[in-house]
């Protein structure tokens, strides 16, 4: 009798186990069935924002084959997608992305999201608001992910920033199947080229939409075009000729951090005068180098920055005395504040440092560009 009872209990246990398994399978199947399918649209079919000029590879900022004599370090940087974004509209409750990059190893002073990831903004109440990021996969050059979900099905105006420091080779934007997606309007007006160092390119913002040219664009409505060249903005003749050739309305030169004091003295005039010849009326705004925090203790570093900034000030006076018009100067004394908390590594601003920098330069840029750019 006990044996029969044991067998019956065993059978009940097995049936119960399989019953739970079947229920879990049905639940999983049902959940999978309800999960929406994703429809992807290539970035080339949407609106690309932030291009300085057209390029064969749409994710490159400059066509390096179009300009002779560019230094190798410059060629490496200008094919990276820092400052580029995709504008689109959708009524999808979720937004997804599939993208590939060249696989550059992220810098120790930057997040992988800023270096190789994507950063989404959605317009809310007339202002661009952060909505989500696409995280790259460790050790992989391609990834797919959900950037944001759980939204309503009203039409949304979106701006998706590309990686700051890697070369983007593929990008597709995904929405729930059945939702609409279309190219968005170009969101900014007036083309203002910012030529500069790693700080312009976005090091060390936490994500690509936090780089200072991107923030300036969203906050002013002007199109600040990111031509940051990490470590390589040294005002070479070939680079000056390239910069002057671009069809833009104004120029911001934030290249002093990469240029030695000697380079500043020898090359600033050629850069400014070359731009002026090609663009007789365009505002040219020259910025001093950010004060490097490490220079308060590393005396040689501190002296180098002081000499860079002193030399560019001298060059500005000379250019103005020569009659160069519509030339402006922004000193760097207050860029990072004065509590020494505005950098990641003593050189590159953190998000706090970038915010402080923007508070200094934005009013001046708006004042100059709002009145000086030809209508």
Image: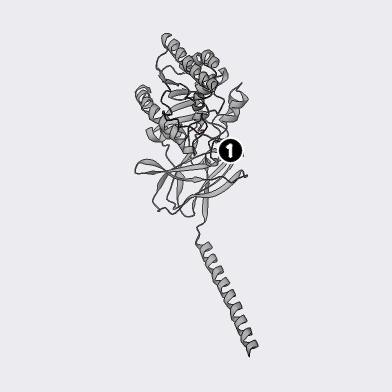
Residue placed most toward the observer, 234 or 359: 359
Q: State the residue at coordinates (53%, 62%).
A: 32
Colour basis: one colour
Residue placed most toward the observer, 179 or 306: 306
Q: How many marks?
A: 1
Tell me if residue 106 is in the magenta stretch.
no
The residue lying furthest to the right in this view is: 3
Residue 189 seen in the figure = no
- Residue 196 location in percent, x, y? 50, 25
- Residue 82 location in percent, x, y? 52, 34
Q: State the residue at coordinates (50%, 59%).
A: 35
Tell me if residue 49 comes above or below residue 11 in the rendering. Answer: above
The residue lying furthest to the bottom in this view is: 1
Question: In which quadrant will I find the N terminus?
Answer: bottom right
Q: Quadrant of residue 21?
A: bottom right
- Residue 356 location in percent, x, y? 41, 31
- Residue 286 location in percent, x, y? 45, 20
Mark 1 Cα shell of 10 Å, populated few (<14), some (14-19), many (≥20): some
Tell me if residue 107 comes above or below residue 289 in the rendering. Answer: below
Check disc 1 and report the residue beneath it: 106
Q: State the residue at coordinates (51%, 42%).
A: 118
Question: In which quadrant will I find the C terminus?
Answer: top left
Q: State the residue at coordinates (52%, 56%).
A: 37
Q: Which residues are magenta?
A: 332-347
Q: Quadrant of residue 282?
A: top left
Classified by dominant secondary structure, the portion drawn in magenta counts as: loop
- Is 25 on the left-hand or right-hand side of 331? right
What SS does tag 1 mark? loop
Tell me if residue 337 is in the magenta stretch.
yes
Residue 74 seen in the figure = yes
């Amino acid at each position: 009798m006990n044996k029969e009872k044991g067998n019956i209990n065993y059978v009940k246990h097995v049936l119960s186990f399989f019953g739970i398994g079947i229920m879990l399978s049905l639940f999983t199947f049902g959940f999978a069935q309800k999960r929406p399918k994703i429809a992807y649209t290539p970035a080339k079919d949407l609106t690309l924002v932030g291009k300085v000029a057209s390029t064969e590879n749409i994710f490159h900022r400059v066509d390096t084959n179009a300009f002779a004599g560019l230094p190798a370090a410059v060629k490496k940087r200008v094919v990276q997608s820092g400052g580029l974004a995709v504008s689109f509209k959708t009524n999808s409750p979720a937004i997804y992305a599939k993208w590939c990059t060249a696989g550059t190893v992220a810098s120790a002073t930057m997040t992988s999201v800023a270096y190789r990831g994507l950063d989404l903004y959605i317009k809310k109440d007339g202002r661009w608001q952060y909505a989500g990021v696409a995280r790259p996969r460790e050790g992989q050059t391609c990834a797919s992910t959900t950037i944001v979900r759980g939204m309503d099905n009203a039409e949304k105006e979106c701006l998706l920033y590309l990686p700051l420091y890697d070369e983007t080779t593929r990008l597709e934007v995904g929405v729930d199947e059945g939702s609409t997606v279309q190219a968005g309007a170009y969101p900014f007006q007036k083309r203002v080229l910012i030529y500069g160092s790693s700080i312009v390119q976005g090091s060390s913002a936490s994500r690509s939409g936090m780089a200072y040219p991107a923030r300036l664009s969203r906050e002013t409505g002007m199109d600040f075009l990111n031509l940051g060249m990490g470590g390589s903005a040294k005002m070479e003749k070939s680079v000056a000729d390239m910069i002057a050739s671009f069809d833009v309305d104004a120029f911001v030169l934030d290249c002093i951090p990469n240029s030695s004091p000697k380079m500043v003295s020898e090359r600033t005039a050629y850069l400014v005068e070359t731009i002026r010849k090609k663009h007789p009326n365009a505002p040219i705004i020259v910025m001093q180098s950010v004060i490097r925090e490490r220079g308060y203790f590393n005396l040689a570093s501190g002296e180098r920055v002081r000499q860079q900034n002193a030399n560019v000030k001298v060059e500005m006076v000379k250019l103005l005395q020569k009659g160069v018009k519509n030339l402006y100067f922004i000193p760097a004394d207050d860029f990072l504040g004065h509590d020494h908390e505005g950098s990641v590594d003593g050189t590159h601003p953190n998000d706090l440092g970038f915010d402080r920098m923007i508070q200094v330069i934005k009013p001046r840029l708006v004042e100059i560009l709002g009145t000086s750019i030809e209508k």
